[in-house]
Structure formats: C-alpha cells, structure tokens
Amino acid sequence: MDIKERIHEFIVTNCLFGDTEYDLTDETPLLDSGIIDSTGVIELVLFVSEAFGIEVPAEDMLPENFNSITRLSNYVQMQAVASAGQ
Amino acid sequence: MEFGTDVLTINPEHETAHIVSKMRQSVQHDFRRKGAIVGLSGGIDSATVLGLAVKAFGPSRVLAVMMPEAHSSPISEEYAARLAAQYEVVAITEDLTAGLAGLGCYTRQNDAVRSVFPDYDPSLDEIKLVLPADLLERGSLNVYSLSLTRPGGEERRKVLPVAAYLQIVAASNMKQRARMLMLYYHAEERNYAVIGTANRNEHAQGFFVKYGDGGADIQPIQHLYKTQVYQLAEYLGVTQEIIDRTPTTDTYSAECSQEEFYFRLPFKQMDLIWYGLDNDIPAAKVATALEISVIQVENVYRDLAQKARSTEYLRAKPLMVR
C-alpha cells in the first residue's frame, strides 16, 4: 500500500466507522466536511508519525497539511525527505 | 448590508427590559417557580445574569450560589461575594472540593497529566490546556497542548495525545456537572428555577459542558455576543473589578484565559468577525472594517464554522427513536 492508501484506510476505519461505501476521495476536504475534527487531527498525527516514522511539530498542524488525503500524503513525503536529509 | 465596528452596539435598557420580561414569563408563568438560582462565578456572565435576575424577581427571590473547588482562584469568590452584597442578594458558598475528590476528579486528571509529564507534582506544578495563539496569522488547527509550569516559573508544553486529552477534559467536566447538581439541589429545595449563564459565544462554539453549565431552565444571555454582555453589565451596575477582569476558565490549576483555552482571539475582534460570518458578510468587507487581511478573516471564519460543526453534539437534545 502506498501512503495515500494507508491514510485512506486509517480514516475509513477510525473516522467513518469502517464505512467503505462513503465517497471518500483523495481530494475530499477532511476538515471542511467534518470527517476529521480536532480529536481526529491528533489521531491522524499519531498515525502518520508511527506509520511513516516522521515527526509532526505543532506548527505544522495547519489546514493546508491536513485537509485532504493528497495534502497529507504530500506533507508526509516532504517530512520523510527532510528527516532523511538530516 | 452595512458593516462597521459598531454593529454589535445594543440599547442596554431595551435589551434588559426584553430579557427581564421573558425571564418573568418563563419562571413565574411557564415553570411556576417562586424565584431564581444563579451560580455566581465571579466572572462577567454570571454577574450580568445575577443583575438581570434581581431586576426580574427582586433580590429577596434570588439566591446566588458560589461553588469553588480546589483549582478555583480565591479572587473569584471574593468578587462574587462583593457583587451579591451590592445587589443585596443572599449568597451561599458550597465548596465542591471534597465531593469532586470523592468522585475521583482530581486523581483522574492527575493520572492523565502524568501520562504526558511523568514528573508532574500536583502539589507544586500548575497545569492548563491551551490552543495555538496564531489563528489570525496561520489558521492553525484546534489541537490542544498541555502546559505545565514548575514553581520556579519554568513552563513546558506538549501536544496532548488523544487519550490524555479526553481524560483531562472528562475529569474537569465533572466540575461543571457537580455545579449543576448543587444548583438544582438549592432550586428544588426552594421551588426556584435555575438561571443559566452561557452567552452566545459559549453556546454556539461549544464552550460549555453538556448537562453541566449547559443545564439550566432558562438561558437569558445565550443570544448575546460577549461584547454585548459587557454592555449589559455596565448598564446593570456590575462591579468594575468584574468588568475589568480577563475572562478565565477557572478550571485548571494554572490561570488560563478563555482566549488561550478556546476562543483564540480577543472578544472584540472575534465577535465582529463572527457577526460577519453569521450575516453572510463577505470577508473582504469585514477585513476592511477591522483593518486586517482577507486571509485572516477567512482563517477565523473557518475556525468558527469548524467549532460550531464539531460541537453540534453538545447542543443536541436526546434523540427519540419513534
């Protein structure tokens, strides 16, 4: 599974009660649609930190990094590259 | 629609007359109660509600109940007592510390804090929950951090894991629920009604505890923005020390303003932006009036909408399945 698929699976399992019929695309606005609330953001942070071995500092918890699977996937890749470069 | 910084100005005399009339109708005629109970915290909202209750029923039919607990600021009770004396209202103190301790409120909260800061010493250290302060500039998400301050003043902050966050909130919410329990004891003992103190900000954005401070028979200032509550307070003669006081949560051991705990903006600024959102005023118009950028207004619009959406559960009545 790639990054997007793993995030998608996490959201379906943890935020949508496992409802695979829900029309969740890579571009669905996670925050604006109410799929993810502030508690959901913390859960997502914990998930991506553990699943992809990255750190998510508080200053990165912004809508532009979390409002869709694509945005979050891009952020994870960026952080992974940054970590590898250190 | 015209939008300016005076858009939330009210006529406090007319507003008071309107609210007082509704309070009398509800309490005396609809609920058939003989008076009113107000939980008096030492803050602006309950002070204003006490003033309204005195206007509606007279001081002899109003009881003020002060309910401090271990983490309450002592100044809160002093301010509350002086206000009650000024209004010539009987005020009693019910210290909730022992009851809350018996329910495990403090132990449960301390355990959750230790899961984040293992060396936390509740007898020395002070804690509070805070949101990021950069809502206008960056529109950051509502993710809570736990702040721990040592006796020497050294402060540490960590983003709260979900389990610790939920446990701290659940434990501290016992305080508001214990207060409701106590208010209804005194209300039922006297055949009085409980008058709530939530304002529009608290109700619509979810800054209240379901079946805690949200539990009351009438909510006379729930339709008013916080800045409008201040206008009423001035008119009703609320003591200056309460008007001048920074609104706090008075819930955690460290002093914590409502701005850093929940609202993330000064009330004067937030109320006007919120009015803009409520009335479909374009962000550009609000930005011009407040001399801030459109992006900043949009950050606040997004935050307000998100808070309203994520707290719908708090405002929902129990659903009945037919």
Image (cartoon, grey):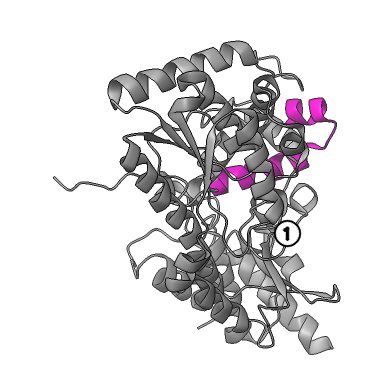
> Viewer-proximal residue, B298 or B312?
B312
Left or right of B15, for residue B3: right
Q: Is residue B267 above or below residue B28?
A: below
- Verify whether residue A83 appears in magenta: no
Quarter of the image with the N terminus of chain B is: top right
Q: Give the image location of residue B24, x and y in percent.
A: 40, 19
Dividing the picture into quadrants, the one containing residue B46 is: top right
The residue beneath circle 1 is B255
Q: Residue at x 63, y 58 (%)?
A: B72
Q: Give the image location of residue B123, x and y in percent.
A: 68, 78
Left or right of B256, for residue B198: left
Dominant SS in magenta: helix
Q: Is residue A47 visible?
A: no
Quarter of the image with the C terminus of chain B is: top left
Left or right of A2, for residue B26: left
Q: Which residues are magenta?
A: B282-307
So how many labels did they put on this image? Answer: 1
> Viewer-proximal residue, A36 or B4?
B4
Q: Is disc 1 placed on a helix, strand or loop? A: loop
Q: Give the image location of residue B276, x and y in percent.
A: 65, 28
Left or right of B27, for residue A36: right
Q: Is residue B303 above or below residue B45?
A: below
Q: Is residue A34 above or below residue A59?
A: above
> Viewer-proximal residue, A42 or A7?
A42
> Viewer-proximal residue, B175 or A23?
B175
Q: Residue at x 70, y 45 (%)?
A: B299
Q: Residue at x 34, y 70 (%)?
A: A18
Kind of residue at disc 1: Glu
